[in-house]
Amino acid sequence: MRRLLFVFLCLSAFALAQQKNSGDELPKLQHLSADQVNLQIDPCTDFYQYACSKFFAANPIPPDQAGWGVAGPLLKWNETVMRQALEAAAAKKQGRTAAEQKIGDYWSSCMDESKVETASAKAFQLDLKRIDELKQKSQLVDELAHQHATIGDVWVVDDNATFAPMFGFTAIQDYDDAQKTVAQFDQGGFAMPGRDFYLNDDAKSVEVRKQYLAHVANMLKLTGESASQAAADAAVVLQMETELAKPAMDVVKRRDPKNINNKMTLAQLQKLSPSFDWQRYLALIHAPAQQTFLVTSPDFFRGLEQAIQQHPIAHWKVYLKWQLAHQSAPYLGKAFVNENFNFFNHTLAGTPELAPRWRRCVHSADNALGDALGQAYVARAFPPQSKERVLRIVKAIEGALDQDITQLSWMTDATKQQASAKLHAILNKVGYPDKWRDYSALEIKPDAYLENVHRATAFEFNRWLQKIGKPIDRYDWTMTPPTINAYYDPQFNTINFPAGILQPPFFSSEADDATNFGAEGSVIGHEITHGFDDQGRKFDEKGNLHDWWTAEDAKNYDERGKCISDEYTQEIPEAGVKQNGLLTQGEDTADNGGLYLALIGLESSLKQQGKTLETKGDDGLTELQRFFLSFANNWCEELRPEIMRTAVLTDPHSLPRYRVNNTIANMPEFARAFGCAKGKPLVHENACRVW
Ligand SMILES: [Zn+2]
């Protein structure tokens, strides 16, 4: 479990951001500028539009994007840097390093589209043949183990489920003993992004399912089925996935780690789902021997048992064939790529056009060989002085929380001491890993794209399996260096900021403090606050799921948390759905705490320079005004209605507009900065504040 900064920018399956022009030139990265402000709009009524609408008017969402914002130019910039590294490695004839051989040949195998049509199709046919030859249900385990070890990300636990056939399997820190790594079985087996997509009855959900049925049928046709067979089989797939979605744990309940901390022996799991040979599965994937397993959702595995019992082998063959085609589609020929895009990027995210091939290949290489490509990215894009300045901001914000904890009126000294100990135990990771991953055991060829993906998947799955039973490694990263995102890991008690987000407009070694603290500082504060949000506060300084709160302090905390979850429970007219504040409470708490901590950090940094928050700069803005504008600028991102709807239903982050307006409306410092009188929409009478 990790808490991200946002998912819009990394929803690669649904919304790979795109660029139309060639990637040869590096786009210019913009800093915040005062003339970006739209003076026609009252900042006290809609600060998001005040800060962002001029940008939106000048930068409409490109046709191959689900959303577009100030991070767009940075995304292009990062992609271009990666492309240049990949092209150079592919073109180099002699004396390539091991990393250059991997990324160069992977790039060549992806970019040669005609080769993909033939070579990938051949490898895919072999996979289909294996499924065709299945005779009885006892063989399901063999096929499933093979799929898990070759395609898809069975080890990646999403907020809603693991998006792999039948279920997910990974290594995770023991909730009760953070020094140990254990094996975890997770709910999964359905391809749409959350269980609500299968179960909701509103007209839009019914329509989306109709389109999903057509999509599954189209994919099955591409595997060689007749139109009538494919239509009948698609109905079977939807029925089976619905049967797996129904007993799956709801996304809100899943946020509470106590609900998913269910330890079982293998015998107990076998009793839960007797029709599946779990021992054999573990042997086939070469998982290290284990005494206990985490089973996130026992009800799901009861439901899986029923599905195995009720459906004949013929149905399971259809299901596995669909899942295989679904997971393989991005690495196959044009027909598969387009059909996959039509549903997952177009219907669910609203993107009108497919991305050019080079951008899809950049992201594919980043996903498969993150550390090898990341090394090249860091060498080109992240100098040591950037790392030093970011670390100084991190220290200033940690100091701000330290000060905040001592001053909290609602917390007793006993809990304050624990909170402070947890804060001091946080490990700050900035830019890239201290030690690069060794890919020497992974074979990459220049002309076999799907097979390269199979081998890279096997390599990464095995890397996760090898963690089981071993001591934890706090220095390992789950994001690659060029990623524009950040995360807090409650079980590792680490904050992690990839080099990809430590660039303008989020951070610049040339920008002033107010700009950097408002943008990157609020991101750093956000991640630190995750250690103390409604989820993070349940873990102690070592990462154990352990209650360190007095009953009175916990009650006070919950009251403050409820203020946040009530405030963010609201209709989202632009998405046509209601936001559940209990789903977004952790992220909203982190947004509010993060901005407050960044402000305290800025104030103390200015003090050292003999300035105050009211000091005016050359642009006519006070430090305080520039700080809030720089914060809002982070979230200048417009989204298409389809991706908004998908996000509100499945994503624990609020939409950008609310991340700005709700957060600042809780801060009297904002009203002071922009002269907002009581009664204005962005001056909340009942202002929420946790940290
Ligand atoms: Zn977050």
Image (cartoon, rainbow, N blue to C red):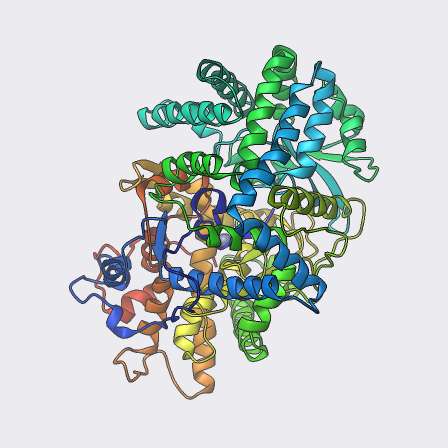
Left or right of 252 in this view: 668? left
Question: Viewed as shown, does residue 300 lie left or right of 632?
Answer: right
Q: Position of residue 225 (x, y in %)?
A: 51, 19
Q: Residue 325, relative to residue 20: is it above or below?
A: above
Residue 671 lies in what quarter of the image? Answer: bottom left
- Is residue 526 depicted above or below 160 in this figure? below
Residue 276 seen by the camera: yes
The residue positioned 69% from the left and 47% from the top of the image is: 460
Residue 624, percent from left and from top:
34, 74
Q: Nearer the viewer, residue 650 or 74?
A: 74
Residue 370, x across and y down, in percent: 61, 57
Count of residue discs:
0
Look at the image and tell me whether residue 429 can be seen.
Answer: no
- In terms of depth relative to the viewer, which is nearer, 232 or 347? 232
Residue at x 43% of width, y 46% of height? 15
State the image coordinates of residue 571 (x, y, percent, origin top left).
Answer: 30, 39
Q: Residue furthest bottom?
A: 610
